[in-house]
Amino acid sequence: MPKPSENDPIRLAVLDTNWTKVQEDINSAMKKVKNALTGTKPMAKPLADRLKKSGRDQWYYAGIFSILNNLDDLLAWWDDKCSVWYTSGLLLDIGLKIGDLNPGYEAAMKKFNEVFGDTRRPDKTIVLESKFVKELIPGTEVQAGVSGSTTVLLQALRYVNSGIVNEKDKITPKEIEAIMNGLIFYWDTSSLKRFLKQFHTAVEVWAAYTLYLEEYEHKKPLSPPLTPPLIPQVPPIPKL
């Protein structure tokens, strides 16, 4: 069973070792997502049909709960006692369902494909001959090319923020960075998805996130730009 490389320099550089704070930030963001997408709020109305469907990965992170439930059920059931792994998988599935509702979605995906489209083949395998891969630091783990799913989720989070009136209640850049840590953790610890080679590595998540920062946060920041911490040791993995 393939496991994430503990010596991956990108993974070491970007992962936050304070998993208690990471989970707090992910949970805070998820509460905002849940509040925005449920209830009688105007934003929730066009989302009803989107979330009354199964998610791509829910059979994996939700297990038996995925059999008779759709994403709206899993979102209603969610609370802050759920694991980082479960919450990250659910966020990813929700993002894949609603990301294209963001007005900037098409432009974002066009930019993503211009920058990283050549890193992935149609069969979802990485192009080792691509410029991106050739310029990586030796020892960096790669698998399926830069993550388009991460880009779609980031657009979904922008869409959710667009429906939140009060600035203080919006998903923050710090919370978005925590979600990126959650995605890496999700794919790091998804043993079956790793066995099936249906996962992304740290650099494949962080490259998509870096492009997002360049296109949005650094041009029109909601707060001071975040600098990924350089972590000299392997981050501890929280228990599921």
Image: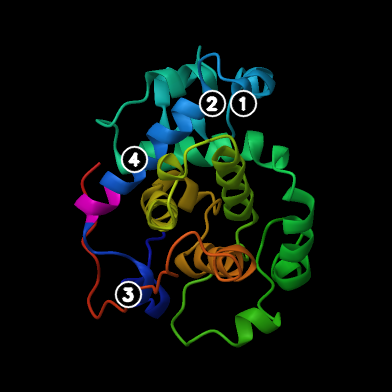
Disc 4 or 3, which lies upstream in sequence? 4
Whole-angstrom CA distance, mark 2 to mark 1, is 7 Å
| Residue in the foreground of this view, choosing between 219 and 118 | 219
Three-letter amino acid code of the residue under disc 3: Pro
Horizontal and vertical percent for residue 100?
72, 41
Left or right: 56 in relation to 223: right
Disc with the residue nearer the chain's start (2 vs 1): 2
Q: Nearer the viewer, residue 101 or 67?
A: 101
Q: Secondary structure at mark 3?
A: loop
Majority secondary structure of magenta residues: helix
Which disc number belongs to residue 43?
A: 1
Q: Nearer the viewer, mark 4 or mark 3?
A: 4
In which quadrant is the N terminus drawn?
A: bottom left
Tag in front: 3 or 1: 1
Q: Are marks 2 and 1 in contact (CB under 8 Å)?
A: yes
Q: Give left or right: position of 95 versus 58.
A: right
Quadrant of the rendered image containing residue 129: bottom right
Q: Which amino acid does the dot numbered 1 rest on?
A: Met
Q: Which mark is residue 37?
A: 2
Residue type at the position of mark 2: Leu
Residue at 21 percent of width and 60 percent of height: 18
- Label 3 vs 1, first from the N-terminus: 1
Q: Is residue 147 above or below residue 168?
A: below
Q: Which residues are magenta?
A: 19-23
Q: Is residue 33 left or right of residue 81?
A: right
Identify the residue under disc 3: 229
